[in-house]
Image (cartoon, rainbow, N blue to C red):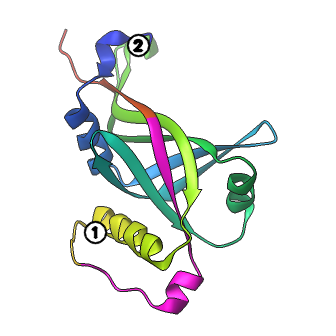
Amino acid sequence: MRRKEREITDIDNKMAIIDKCKVCRLGLSDDNQPYIVPLNYGYCLDADVLTLFFHGAQKGKKVDIIKKNNMACFEVDCDSQFIEGATPCTSAYLYKSVTGRGKIIIMETAEDKINGLNKIMKHQTGKYPEYRFTEADLKNVMVYKMEVEEFTGKQKEFTEK
């Protein structure tokens, strides 16, 4: 990272951003062509290993790409604010973000799908019941996870001059 003073190294601070954000941009590669899609997500952190959970339709471009190449990257950001300066070059944009990369794994079993969907619902709603899903629900949805291999945080906060 070029701007080391903006790097977030503490895992708890990175996780606070992941917890606060609600949309994750998932980056994929289709025959060396970039493809990015915004998604709602859920997550878990186990022994400092981050896993992100997503869901969507059983068919489509995203699914086709994942089945050909399961390497992916992600980005989440929040707390953004434009600060206008006296000139354009003295303006600033405040933010907190986390980016990373890993492998996408399609969840096959009903138990794995339910686990992933519960993680998504808990993160998106802030509620913690065990949601119930019908057999038809599980049949009609693709649930997949990203096993994150590395992730970094970055922020620009307000500083008075």
**Which secondary structure lies at badge 2?**
loop
Please give the residue where the numbered disc 2 appears in the rendered image.
Answer: 87
Q: Quadrant of residue 12?
A: top left
| Residue 38's disc number | none
Indicate the position of residue 160 as horizontal and vertical percent values. 17, 14
- Magenta stretch encompasses residue 15: no
- Classify 10 Å Cα crowding around label 1: few (below 14), some (14-19), many (20 and above): few
Residue type, numbered disc 1:
Thr
Q: CA distance from mark 1 to mark 2?
A: 41 Å
Q: Quadrant of residue 77?
A: top left
Q: Residue at coordinates 51% horizontally, 41% vertically from top-left?
A: 74
| Chain part drawn in magenta | 130-149
Q: Residue at coordinates 36% horizontally, 44% vertically from top-left?
A: 50
Q: Residue at coordinates 38% horizontally, 12% vertically from top-left?
A: 90
Indicate the position of residue 109 as horizontal and vertical percent values. 51, 74
- Magenta stretch encompasses residue 142: yes
Say whether residue 68 is left or right of residue 50.
right
- Classify 10 Å Cα crowding around label 2: few (below 14), some (14-19), many (20 and above): few
Q: Nearer the viewer, mark 1 or mark 2?
A: 1
Say whether residue 64 is left or right of residue 140.
right
Front position in the image: 106 or 85? 106
Indicate the position of residue 97 as horizontal and vertical percent values. 37, 34
Please give the residue where the numbered disc 1 appears in the rendered image.
Answer: 125
Residue 45 versus residue 97 in the image, above or below: below
| Residue extending furthest toward the right | 31
- Quarter of the picture holding the N terminus: top left
Q: Residue at coordinates 45% horizontally, 16% vertically from top-left?
A: 88
Residue type, numbered disc 2:
Thr
- Quarter of the picture holding the C terminus: top left
